[in-house]
Amino acid sequence: MIVCICHRVSDRDIAIAASSGCPNFEALQDDLRVATACGACRDCACAVFEESRVDSASPRGRGVAIAVRVQLAA
């Protein structure tokens, strides 16, 4: 799903960045520009980022993150 319409950032983009070691939401904004234009997506983007960080910390979550990367690469 598209989270940030202004910069066309999806929940998958955010999950990939989070699982790749993006340290905080501010760094995510620098990398993807999410929530830097109108700001309407900020709460949703933060929630997706935090959820993705929690998921990537668990062994199960790492497999999901890898599956998302593989799916996006295909």
Image: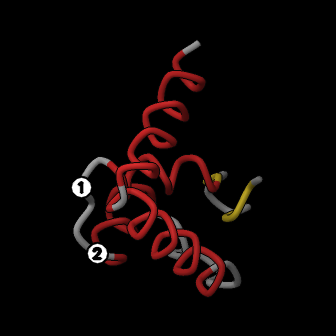
The image quadrant of residue 24 is bottom left
In the image, residue 73 sits, relative to residue 58, either above or below, namely above
Q: Residue at x 44, y 46 (%)?
A: 16
In the image, residue 68 sits, relative to residue 2, either above or below, namely above
Residue at the disc numbered 1: 21
- Identity of the amino acid at label 2? Asn
User: Residue 53's x, y, as percent?
Assistant: 39, 66
Locate the C terminus by quadrant.
top right
- Identity of the amino acid at label 1? Gly
User: Residue 57's x, y, as percent?
Assistant: 32, 62
In the image, residue 68 sits, relative to residue 1, either above or below, namely above
Q: Check disc 2: other Cα within 10 Å, few if <14, some if 14-19, many if 20+.
A: few
In the image, residue 7 sits, relative to residue 28, either above or below, namely above
Q: Secondary structure at mark 2?
A: loop
Q: Number of marks in the image?
A: 2
Q: Check disc 1: other Cα within 10 Å, few if <14, some if 14-19, many if 20+.
A: few
Cα–Cα span, label 1 and label 2: 9 Å
Q: Secondary structure at mark 1?
A: loop
Residue at the disc numbered 2: 24
Q: Residue at x 27, y 60 (%)?
A: 22
The image quadrant of residue 27 is bottom left
Q: What colouring style does the render use?
A: secondary structure
